């Protein structure tokens, strides 16, 4: 190859090397080329491409896929294979030299070219690394051949060839969740196993019609017509149909907004509104379906027992016979369900045929007027009867709404098809068509039965052939015009007619027993649909692991992933209520459970539309957000109309489950409309804030905390969180100075871990990081760029640099210049010093701490041990030091024995204990995590910085942790004006509405300090220009600008003495304080060297309780004006 193409030296060029990566198969080496394009056939039955022509068959059109790296060892065999010269012309061009179906050994099949067939090489999208648009790149589950396909990542297309690539399967940082992986495995299983799937007729239409056509059609519809009349009954039907139609439209919109998996109403609601609503409604919806099984079976059993009673064939008594028949029936239904969805579907078809025959039997019989039926009220179609029954005739305190409450359950059942969405061939098409058509057909049927019954049956009839019209009776009703006098029925006691006989449809029908068969069919089909729906919904709920402990019911069996355990659970629940044999109390609650589901489905569509998320784009366009909202309101109204106390019970259960799921915060992310709306509202409010001018009354400390990894300085974050929580913005900033920058996957995972740590510790903050060459430049970037509109930091918070004297003075220069930069940008500055330090990163591996899920034993209090990769108050300057669980200690505080005693349990093999210094550092790092108890916060407000030094202590005492602490204020003053200065400060504090316990005026601040080792402290950092030539001194000063000159030291001698004196006063007055908040001394930039300023801060804050050095930007943050 080297001789034929461009010589042996050409192999060292990047273009040639990339082609080596691309053409792994051509070289006879491993087919796992990183940039090789696999062509996976769309159909699992695809055949190899024909070699007779350049165009492959249609089914061979495939999907490119990125697979593994080619071993450089393949180059040896490559030298003996000739390739055309144009193979090296374009670095991003792929070519293969064989056309056949290849297996990569990992379940991937791909197509490639041969010498006679170069279709793939010459076709756009097949001859480049950059993939063309393809549906399989957007799947969450497996493709046809059983594996999700992944597009080349941006890094693979953009980075240099010698850069370390991403791992396979995680291109662009897209990592599948556990649920998606499970779904992918299930999809692969279905693709191989030939799962039974249903179309829209068998899967949705038939199920919905069977569930809607219940026993109400045959034994209650005619009674409602008698009570409410034809007109109001049609209004009742139309109102119920309106609710179900709106819900059907909303269901169709959700079902067509992406691929729908199994779970029915639960899946639709949870993926739209989130796990809180979905989890609560899913549980009660599955339970309602389980109890509905009992309701329908008991209805069937009661009909059977009535027939047995008519022929005097009861086994024991009516109640126990209902239990016996119901138990046998539910066992039979369970057997049909467990046999598989295919058998259940066949049973549903048989039941539908019987039901349709019964309905047709009624309408045929209504046209056959038989004289023997006239005494019982059936006269055939008659205008007089129609007009008489047109208006209402409510009796026994019945009302329009009571009739509506009785009828509405007959209109439910519209989710029967959606509940088995996982068993549908195309849920997006089947659910809208089947559900809406079922609503139309059943609605027309109810209206037709209403008009038919009201037109041919009178309200009251005696059943006596002798009750004919006589000349002495003044009779004016419709029956009188037909020769019968039923006026005696006004006194009560009649057993026939619309108002008295629930079996009127049997009377009217052409063959009475067929109506009984229709009743059996209606009850059994509804029971069977509920028995299948409940386990399917419950299985989907359990798979999402929203409620711990229910995962055992998520397991599926067989090629159809049947929830056998769910079937058994549903059977047990149904059987328990069947044995009660009295469901008059529980039935309204079940109806309300269904209505609650309908209300949430409608609200889901409204909510998703209101959130205006780009992801909400259903292909079903016949919906309207306001119509859906009206549907949700209607469902709630109907709930209270049917049974107000049952509606309250339902709402309380939903609320309780919602609160539980919200508290548990399941680790799921479904892109719900709740998330979209929160984003939309946040964006809107942020934009609105940009038009609002800052006002002193609305000032909030918005802190940029230079903490490195958030768990490396927990004390710093916990203290800042104490005065920013629910008050101001807090950003945990991390300047990273590592030489090797992580790739996208590592960055996204690390960012997620850090934010998760903050959330777990209930620290309300955002984590962000930036790469820079040092802390100063990174802090400059952060102070200028972090924030959004008015939500921008205004205060820089850092830890005090405890170890500054032991390190490189260039780091001190960077540290001090960062403070200067903050003042230049009009930031306030806060420094926190703990005598033992803040940084605990050297104690335990950061990676373990962020990802560890190990919990301390009962009675112990976890101590957060973390790592940051840098020095105190600085960023990381070295690569991460990752420690494993085998070499990292687990530190715990034993609360029972002592609050200060530390129990160390090592997981390492060496069992080496921590040093006493590290133990003390760990204890100190947790001191702001707990409630502080009674004590004082001493505020040394020596210089007026706008009030930030006073505002922070006030905010601290407003919180729960520092609420028991009192504020003591210390100010400077003259000895002869101490009382005057105290009264003036008390007046100012009272006007600021800030409570304080004491005010101390220090009149001896400028007193000469006692003997101090300040000279020894600054000695190593002095320039000592008197001991060298002027040129050498200037050169040294230019190289090390942090050095202290003699002139500078003399110029600021008084200020240096002041820091020494203030430290003495702090030890004298505030050594027992819980926290000291003190005005930070300023150093003029360009005049005071970094070493001298650092010495001031060191001298001032040495050997003291926790100390906050605060300096605002000298703009007022407090006001006494209203």
Image (cartoon, rainbow, N blue to C red):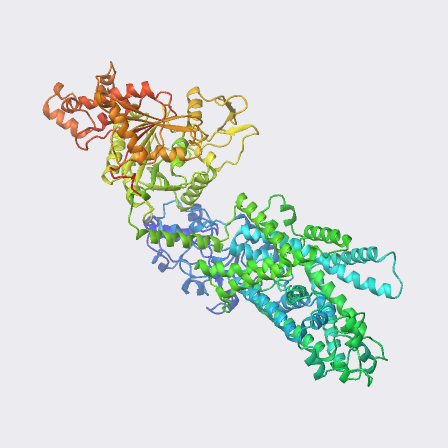
Residue 142 at least partly seen: yes
Question: Residue 164 at what x, y percent from top left?
Answer: 39, 44
Question: Residue 68 at what x, y percent from top left?
Answer: 46, 49
In the picture, which quadrant includes the C terminus? top left
Q: Please, is residue 123 above or below residue 952 in the view?
A: below
Q: Please, is residue 811 above or below residue 348 in the view?
A: above
Residue 880 at least partly seen: no
State left or right for residue 860 relative to residue 703.
right
Question: Residue 727 at what x, y percent from top left?
Answer: 38, 41
Q: Quadrant of residue 1065?
A: top left
Question: Residue 1083 at what x, y percent from top left?
Answer: 21, 30
Q: Quadrant of residue 872?
A: top left
Q: Nearer the viewer, residue 451 or 112?
A: 451
Q: Nearer the viewer, residue 1018 or 717?
A: 717
Residue positioned 46% across, 22% down in the render = 914
Q: Quadrant of residue 481?
A: bottom right
């Amino acid at each position: 190859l080297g001789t034929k193409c461009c010589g042996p030296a050409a192999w060292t060029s990047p273009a040639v090397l990339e082609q080596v990566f691309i053409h792994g198969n051509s070289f006879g080496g491993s087919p796992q080329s990183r940039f090789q394009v696999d062509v996976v056939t769309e159909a699992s039955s695809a055949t190899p491409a024909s070699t007779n022509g350049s165009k492959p068959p249609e089914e061979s059109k495939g999907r490119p896929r990125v697979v593994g790296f080619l071993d450089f060892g393949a180059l040896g065999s490559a030298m003996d294979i000739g390739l055309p010269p144009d193979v090296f012309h374009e670095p991003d061009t792929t070519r293969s030299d064989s056309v056949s179906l290849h297996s990569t050994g990992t379940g991937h099949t791909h197509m490639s070219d041969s010498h006679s067939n170069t279709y793939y090489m010459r076709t756009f999208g097949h001859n480049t690394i950059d993939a063309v648009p393809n549906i399989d790149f957007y799947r969450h589950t497996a493709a046809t051949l059983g594996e999700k396909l992944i597009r080349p990542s941006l890094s693979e297309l953009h980075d240099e060839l010698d850069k370390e690539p991403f791992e396979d399967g995680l291109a662009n940082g897209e990592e599948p969740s556990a649920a998606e992986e499970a779904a992918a495995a299930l999809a692969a299983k279905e693709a191989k196993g030939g799962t039974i799937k249903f179309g829209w007729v068998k899967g949705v239409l038939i199920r919905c019609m069977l569930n809607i056509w219940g026993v109400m059609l045959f034994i209650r519809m005619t009674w409602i017509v008698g009570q409410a009349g034809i007109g109001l009954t049609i209004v009742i039907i139309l109102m119920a149909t309106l609710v179900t139609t709106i819900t059907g439209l909303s269901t169709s919109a959700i079902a067509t907004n992406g691929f729908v998996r199994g779970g029915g109403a639960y899946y639709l609601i949870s993926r739209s509104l989130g796990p809180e609503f979905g989890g609560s409604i899913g549980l009660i919806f599955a339970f309602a379906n389980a109890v509905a099984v009992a309701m329908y079976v008991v209805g069937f059993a009661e009909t059977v027992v009535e027939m047995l009673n008519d022929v005097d064939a009861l086994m024991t008594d009516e109640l126990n016979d209902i239990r016996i028949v119901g138990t046998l029936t539910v066992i039979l239904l369970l057997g049909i369900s467990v046999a598989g969805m295919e058998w259940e579907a066949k049973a549903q078809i048989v039941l539908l045929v019987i039901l349709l025959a019964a309905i047709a039997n009624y309408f045929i019989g209504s046209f056959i007027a038989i004289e023997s039926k006239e005494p019982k009220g059936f006269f055939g179609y008659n205008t007089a009867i129609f007009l008489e029954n047109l208006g209402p005739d409510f009796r026994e305190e019945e009302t329009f709404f009571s009739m509506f409450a009785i009828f509405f359950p007959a209109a439910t059942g519209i989710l029967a098809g959606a509940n088995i969405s996982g068993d549908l061939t195309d849920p997006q098409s089947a659910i809208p068509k089947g559900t809406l058509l079922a609503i139309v057909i059943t609605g027309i049927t109810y209206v037709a039965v209403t008009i038919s019954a009201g037109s041919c049956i009178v309200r009251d009839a005696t059943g006596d052939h002798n009750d004919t019209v006589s000349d002495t009776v003044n009779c004016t009703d419709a029956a009188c015009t037909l020769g019968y006098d039923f006026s005696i029925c006004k006194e009560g006691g009649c057993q026939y007619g619309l108002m008295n006989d629930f079996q009127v449809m049997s009377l009217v029908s052409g063959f009475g027993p067929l109506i009984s068969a229709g009743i059996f069919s209606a009850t059994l089909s509804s029971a069977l649909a509920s028995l299948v729906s409940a386990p399917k919904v419950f299985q989907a709920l359990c798979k999402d692991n929203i409620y711990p402990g229910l995962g055992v019911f998520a397991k599926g069996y067989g090629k159809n992933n049947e929830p056998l355990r769910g079937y058994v659970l549903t059977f047990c629940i149904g059987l328990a209520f069947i044995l009660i044999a009295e469901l008059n109390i529980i039935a309204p609650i079940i109806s309300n459970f269904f209505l609650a589901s309908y209300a949430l489905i409608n609200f889901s569509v409204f909510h998703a539309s209101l959130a205006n998320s780009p992801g909400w784009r259903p292909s079903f366009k016949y919906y309207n957000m306001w119509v859906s909202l009206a549907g949700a309101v209607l469902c709630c109204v109907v709930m209270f109309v049917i049974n107000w106390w049952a509606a309250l019970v339902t709402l309380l259960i939903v609320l309780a489950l919602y609160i539980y799921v919200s508290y548990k915060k399941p680790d799921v992310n479904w892109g719900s409309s709740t998330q979209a709306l929160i984003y939309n509202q946040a964006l809107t409010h942020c934009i609105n804030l940009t038009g609002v001018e800052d006002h002193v009354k609305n000032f909030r400390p918005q802190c940029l905390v230079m903490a490195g990894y958030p768990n490396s300085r927990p004390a710093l974050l916990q203290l800042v969180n104490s005065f920013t929580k629910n008050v101001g913005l807090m950003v945990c900033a991390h300047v990273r100075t590592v030489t090797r920058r992580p790739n996208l996957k590592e960055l996204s995972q690390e960012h997620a871990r850090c934010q998760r740590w903050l959330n777990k510790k209930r620290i309300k903050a955002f984590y962000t990081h930036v790469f820079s060459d040092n802390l100063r430049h990174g802090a400059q970037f952060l102070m200028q760029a972090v924030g959004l509109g008015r939500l921008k930091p205004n205060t820089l918070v850092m830890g005090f640099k405890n170890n500054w004297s032991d390190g490189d003075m260039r780091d001190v220069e960077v540290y001090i210049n960062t403070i200067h930069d903050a003042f230049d940008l009009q930031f306030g500055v806060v420094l926190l010093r703990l005598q033992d330090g803040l940084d605990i990163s050297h104690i335990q591996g950061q990676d373990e701490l962020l990802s560890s899920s190990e919990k301390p034993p009962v009675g112990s209090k976890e101590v957060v041990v973390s790592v940051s990769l840098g020095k105190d108050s600085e960023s990381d300057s070295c690569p991460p030091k990752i420690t494993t669980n085998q070499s990292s200690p687990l530190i715990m505080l034993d609360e029972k024995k002592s609050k200060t005693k530390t129990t160390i349990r090592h997981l390492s093999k060496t069992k080496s204990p921590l040093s006493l210094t590290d133990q003390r550092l760990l204890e100190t790092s947790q001191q702001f995590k707990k409630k502080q108890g009674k004590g004082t916060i001493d505020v040394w407000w020596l210089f007026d910085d706008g009030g930030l030094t006073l505002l922070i202590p006030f905010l601290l005492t407003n919180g729960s942790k520092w609420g028991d602490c009192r504020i003591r204020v210390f100010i400077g003053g003259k000895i002869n004006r101490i009382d005057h200065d105290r009264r003036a400060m008390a007046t100012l504090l009272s006007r600021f509405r800030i409570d304080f316990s004491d005010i101390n005026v220090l009149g001896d601040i400028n007193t000469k300090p006692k003997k101090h080792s300040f000279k020894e402290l600054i000695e190593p950092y002095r320039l000592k220009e008197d001991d060298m030539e002027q040129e050498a001194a200037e050169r040294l000063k230019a190289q090390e600008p942090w050095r202290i000159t003699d002139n500078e030291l003399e110029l600021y001698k008084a200020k240096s003495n002041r820091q020494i004196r203030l430290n003495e006063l702090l030890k004298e007055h505030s050594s027992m304080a819980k926290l000291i908040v003190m005005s930070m001394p300023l150093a003029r930039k360009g005049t005071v060297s970094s070493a001298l300023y650092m010495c001031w801060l060191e001298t001032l804050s040495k050997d003291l309780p926790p100390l906050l050095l605060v300096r605002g930007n000298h703009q007022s943050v407090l006001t006494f004006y209203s």
